[in-house]
Image: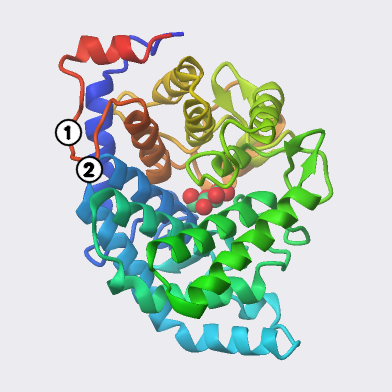
Amino acid sequence: MTISSRVDLHALLDRSRTVITSLQEPNGAYPASPTFSAYRGYCWFRDGSFIADGASAAGEAESATAFFDWCAMVIGRHAERIRDIVAAASAGAPLPDDRMLPARFTFAGELGVDEWWDFQLDGYGTWLWAAADHAARHDLPVERWADAAALTVDYLLSSWERPCYDWWEEHSEHVHVSTLGCIAAGLEAAARSGLVTGERADAAHAGAERVRDRILASGVAEGHLTKWLGTDAVDGSLSSLIAPLGVVAPQSGLAAATRAALTTQLENGGGVYRFTADTFYGGGRWPLLSCFLGLSYAAAGDEAGARRLFAWAVGTATDDQLLPEQVDGELLAPERRQEWIERWGPVATPLLWSHAMVLRLAAELGLVGAAGGVVNAGAGARRAAVAS
Ligand code: BGC
C-alpha cells in the first residue's frame, strides 16, 4: 500500500507540528480538539501526554516541556485532594470515585463543570512516563517536576487496583489492562529517571512490578493481552504497552500474540478499530490506533508492517491536512453514526492526539528527528519511504 497521491507527507508532518504548537495554550495545556463541542476548553492527561511525547520525538522539545510544566501545576493545585485520597486509602477507607482525580481539566487546571466520565487513572501514569522519556531524549533535568511526580506516584500506588473508566471513558466497573500498563510504565519511569528518589523510588519500582504481575496473572488470554482483567476480548489501545510504553518486551511471545490478535480482530486495511463492540460515531477506525499498532510493529523490527499502518493513518488527512479522531467508512455499527453527529456534531477534527501519533511513528520510521526538521531530502523520497 502507498499513501494516497493527494497526501503530501512533508506538508502533513509540518502541519502536524503547527497544529500542536500553535494550539497549545501559553501555560502548556494542549486542547484535545479546539473546535469539537464536547472537548472544547479541556486538556486531558492521556491525550496531552501522548501529544507531548510525539512533539518531543519530532523536535518540539519546548512544547513538550511546557506541557509537563502544566501537568506539574495541575497536580500541585490539587495536592490537598491527592493527600486526602492517599490518606483514606492507607486507612482502609478509599474515597468514592467522584473524589478521585479526573481525566481532564480546564486549561487553567480546574475541575470542569460539565458532566464527564471522569475517574480514569491511566493519564497519571502516562504523564510520568512521557516526562521521563522526554527528559532522557533531550538530556533535560527532571527536578522541576519532582514535587508533582512524588504526589502522582503516591496517588497511583494508593489506587492502582481500583476499577475506573478506560482510555475510551467506558466501563468503570472493570480494571483495564491498558490503564494498568500506563501505570506500570509511569511508576517504573519515575523511579528510573530520578523523578522520584529514595524510598519513594523503591516503592515506585516495586509497585510497577506488582502491576506487571497483575497484568500477567489476569490480563492475558490465549497468549495475548486482554481489554480488561478476566475477559478474552482485545482493545486497540493494548499495542501501546508494547510501544511506546515498553511494558511488554516487543520480541516476546506475549507481544507477538497481542499484535496478531489486534491485527486479526481490529485492523481493517491499515485502519484500527477501538474494540469490536464500538458504536461511537458508528465505530470507525482511528488513525492514532494505527500509529500505536505501527509502533509495536516497528519495535519488533517489522518495518514493513509499521509503514503499512503509517500509510493508512496519513491517508486519513483532510484536504487541508488535518487529522480526524476517526474516519467514516467500514463502520462497525453504521446505524449508530447519525445519533452522535446530532449530539456532538461532526467527528473531532483536528484531533491533536492523531497528529502527535503520526509524528511519533514518523520519528520511529526516521522521517522526522528529535533534533527537529524532516529527515529525508525530497518529498518524493519521503513518499517513497512510506510505500510498502
Ligand atoms: C476518547 C478519549 C479521549 C477524548 C479526548 C474521547 O472520545 O474516548 O480517549 O481522551 O475523546 O480526545
- Give the percent coordinates (x, y) of residue 105: 45, 68
User: Distance of mark 1 from mark 2, alpha carbons?
Assistant: 7 Å
* Three-letter amino acid code of the residue under disc 1: Gly
Left or right for 159, reference 348:
right
Q: In this view of the protein, can residue 102 be seen by the observer?
A: no
| Residue 186: x %, y % from top left | 50, 60
Q: Residue 71 sits in which quadrant?
A: bottom left
- Secondary structure found at label 2: loop
Residue drawn at (26%, 62%) of the image: 66
Which residue is under mark 2? 59
Horizontal arrangement in the rendering, residue 132 relative to residue 66 (left or right): right
Q: In which quarter of the image is residue 328?
A: top right
Question: Which label sits on residue 121?
Answer: none
Q: Is mark 1 on a helix, strand or loop?
A: loop
The disc at residue 373 is 1
Query: Position of 365 compared to 81: left or right?
Result: left
Say whether mark 1 is within 8 Å of ligand 1.
no
- Mark 2, Cα crowd under 10 Å, few <14 / some 14-19 / many 20+, is many
Q: Is residue 250 above or below residue 155?
A: above
On screen, residue 230 above or below 106:
above
| Circles 1, 2 touching at the beta carbon (< 8 Å) | yes
Picture colour scheme: rainbow
Compare residues 230 and 288 and report the one nearer the observer. Answer: 230
Where residue 147 appears, x then y in whole percent?
Answer: 38, 79
Estimate the x, y position of residue 257 in percent, counting from the top left: 70, 29
Is residue 275 visible in this depiction of the protein?
yes
Q: Which residue is drawn at 55% across and 77% down?
A: 154
Front in this rendered view, residue 371 or 349: 371
Residue for point 61% across, 67% down: 206
Does residue 80 lie above or below 62 as drawn? below
Establish if 121 lies above or below 316.
below
- What's under tag 2, amino acid-wise? Gly
